[in-house]
Image (cartoon, grey):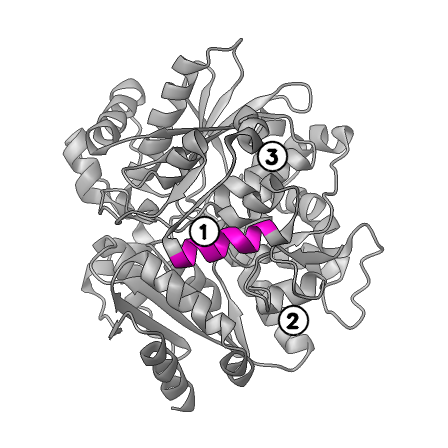
Amino acid sequence: MQYISTRGQAEPTDFFGVLMHGLAPDGGLYVPDEWPTLDPALLRRLRSMPYATAAWHVMRPFIHGGSTGDAGDRGISDATLRRLLEEAYASFVHHSVAPLFQTGPDEWLLELYHGPTLAFKDVAMQVLGRMYEHVLAHHDRHSTLVGATSGDTGSAAIEAIRRSTRASIFIMHPRGRTTEVQRRQMTTVQAPNVHNIAIEGTFDDCQRILKALFNDAAFRDEVSLSGVNSINWARVLPQVVYYATAASSLGAPDVEVSFSVPTGNFGDIFAGYVAKQMGVPIKRLVIATNDNDILARFLETGDHVLEGVTPTISPSMDIQVSSNFERLLFDIHDRDPARVRADMQALVDDGRFHVDPARLDGVRELFGAHRADERQTLAAIRDVFDETGFQIDPHTAVGVHAARTDRTEHPDDGTPMVVLGPAHPAKFPAAVERATGVRPALPPHLSDLYDREERLAVLPADVATVRDHIRAKLAG
């Protein structure tokens, strides 16, 4: 399996190269040069497998490309991959890892928050952290991991790396734009290799700084820079698994399944697109967005236009620049990197680009997009609670609203609709209590979170300042 850049000016690499470099040297994102397929008989068997075993079957072709899986010089054999996955998912409190809960007729919630930090990011990060540690030890190397977070990626990455002896991690978050629970899950970790940076700006500022650091070749080599954001293909890959296991549980390959996905940086829903390319019978992928609805507007008009970021009660989706969307754009342009480069340059220069709506016809057959404002988000939290007694967080509520809207606009013959539940309601207690009248409690292992000491640096949204800060911390 080889990986190519969406911008076409970087040499192809293998999974090891993707894992260690994250962003391609030309500023593009790595994608597989071809899509492997899941045998229908295997897809049918996933429903009876332990989650780690199912993950091994789904992920293996992207790592070994169907070879025998010998480690060679690159470090991840079949046996090692199986061990890393088993260790990663042993950290989840639910034995199913990603269980389904029925919320209505042909409507299901995929619970993705049973990992250590109560968010779907754990599903990938617990794997990624172990891969990093294993590969770095195999090559006797050290690495500097840098990430940007709108709320959940940071804590999941920190939890995955905090015990590493071979990696230091720096996480940027937008100051004052996460919930207190999200912030404290990052800033109260006192491990010496963990560094938190509160950026005076938005999440898009954090992402801009992150990309600039990766595009600085000298700095990247100086500190052995690697990434934990979903710009790293190794972050997206483990998320493909729960689309396959959920679909299998609901009858795939003999039954089609649709998914409604709360969408910010586009990594999670792109994982669904990958599952579709592999042969998982996905009928619809619904982009569920809050007031920051740039992707819904693009799908409707073909105009990708940046606007200001509006703070909402679903802060992990308060994004205008969805980095992973470039991967889908690559396929929209029939994998023509010159077109992608032109669009990305126009976005930098003009804050916008346009795609001929005719090119979007095929995309619209698979993708839908619906927006939930604050009132609709709170209403969805309340409705699910009244109907089931089950509390959901605001991001999940955006997904519920989008799923039900899509069902109304596209009535079908009973295709199961799965809403991805990205976060535990206790991560957003104020909004959930406002909607239901009941404040969700943190689980026991986080019950003292509000009493823990915080440690962070507050920096301006300036690349040079952040770069100097990282250098100083590493030197210290």
- Rendered position, 228 above or below 191: above
Say which label, 1 or 2, has the lower sequence index: 1
Residue drawn at x 41%, y 14% is: 409
Query: In front here: 428 or 204?
Result: 204
Element carrying mark 3: helix
Q: Would you name the residue on which mark 2 appears?
A: 135
Residue at figure coordinates x 72%, y 69% from the top left? 75
Name the residue carrying label 3. Answer: 245
Q: CA distance from mark 1 to mark 2?
A: 21 Å
Please, what is the three-letter code of the amino acid marked with disc 3? Thr
Identified by mark 2, the residue type is Val
Stretch of the chain drawn in magenta: 339-349
Amino acid beneath label 1: Lys
Q: Is residue 18 left or right of residue 435?
A: right
Question: What predominant SS class does the magenta segment belong to?
Answer: helix
Relative to 9, say whether 253 is above or below.
Answer: above
* Mark before the other along the chain sequence, 1 or 3: 1
Q: Quadrant of residue 195?
A: bottom left
**Mark drawn on residue 97:** none
The residue that mark 1 highlights is 121
Which residue lies most toward the top here?
Answer: 413
Q: Position of residue 131 (x, y in %)?
A: 61, 64
Say if residue 153 shows up in the picture. Answer: no
Q: Identify the image quadrant of the N terminus.
A: bottom right
SS label for mark 1: helix
Task: Describe residue 28's horizontal placement relative to residue 465 as left or right.
Answer: right
Q: Name the quadrant of the C terminus.
A: bottom left
Relative to 179, residue 166 above or below: below
